[in-house]
Image (cartoon, coloured by chain):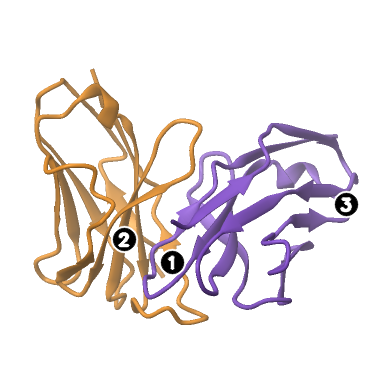
Chain colours: A purple, B orange
Amino acid sequence: GNSVTQMEGPVTLSEEAFLTINCTYTATGYPSLFWYVQYPGEGLQLLLKATKADDKGSNKGFEATYRKETTSFHLEKGSVQVSDSAVYFCALRGGATNKLIFGTGTLLAVQP
Amino acid sequence: GAGVSQTPSNKVTEKGKYVELRCDPISGHTALYWYRQSLGQGPEFLIYFQGTGAADDSGLPNDRFFAVRPEGSVSTLKIQRTERGDSAVYLCASSLSGQTHLYNEQFFGPGTRLTVL
């Protein structure tokens, strides 16, 4: 079945460091891919998305490229801020269903 | 406008009791989803409604779990004979429609934290 695997956290970085959070997936067909973010005390929010191979999703300085050849959707940001501290979830939506399948989440802690 | 709301925000119950969790979707959203998030895990799909009907209930773990959406708006997730393993955050989401469309974003509520003692 469909599944998502993302790197375990926590990831601890200093402000202005480069961020990569790895995400790979297993799916039949052509899934859509998402990154969701959960800030402390808040609900899940969509961060970015990509619906077909080679698409790049971007938002708030974060980027991720849909790589079908490596079944990956790694999240990157060139310069993180303390306000980026949150839990990040990679997710996919595949087939004829609209349900989301999530990874286990990666906690990011950015220190000043 | 108002987002997805869920009540109660916290629920503590005893093993074997019955609980109901409520979700108010964004007005006009025809699709509604329930997910369960255990500690340290990502959300797991439970059930999806398109209008009043359950279009996909493949994620319900067993027959103690049931959900309804009688008027196509508010939904209630019902758990009978609760077990300690049911302790989790129950998330509700809604989207404009259930079609797998590019912009059919799911908007999540803040969740209900259920603790079964």
Real-space Cα distance between discs 1 and 3?
Answer: 28 Å
Disc 2: host chain: B
| Numbered circles on residues, count | 3
Find the distance from the CA under tag 2 to the CA under tag 3.
Answer: 35 Å
Q: Which mark is residue B106?
A: 1
User: Which amino acid type corresponds to the residue marked 3 in the rendered image?
Assistant: Ser
Q: Do residues under tags 2 and 1 come within 8 Å of each other at their CB atoms?
A: yes
Amino acid identity at mark 1: Gln
In front: B71, or A76?
A76
Give the amino acid type for the residue marked by disc 2 in the picture: Tyr
Q: Are marks 1 and 3 in contact (CB under 8 Å)?
A: no
Q: Disc 2 and disc 1: Cα gap in Å?
A: 9 Å
On residue A79, which mark appears? 3
Chain letter behind tag 3: A
Q: Is residue A51 or residue A49 the one in the foreground?
A: A51
- Neighbour class for label 2 at 10 Å: few (<14), some, many (≥20)? many
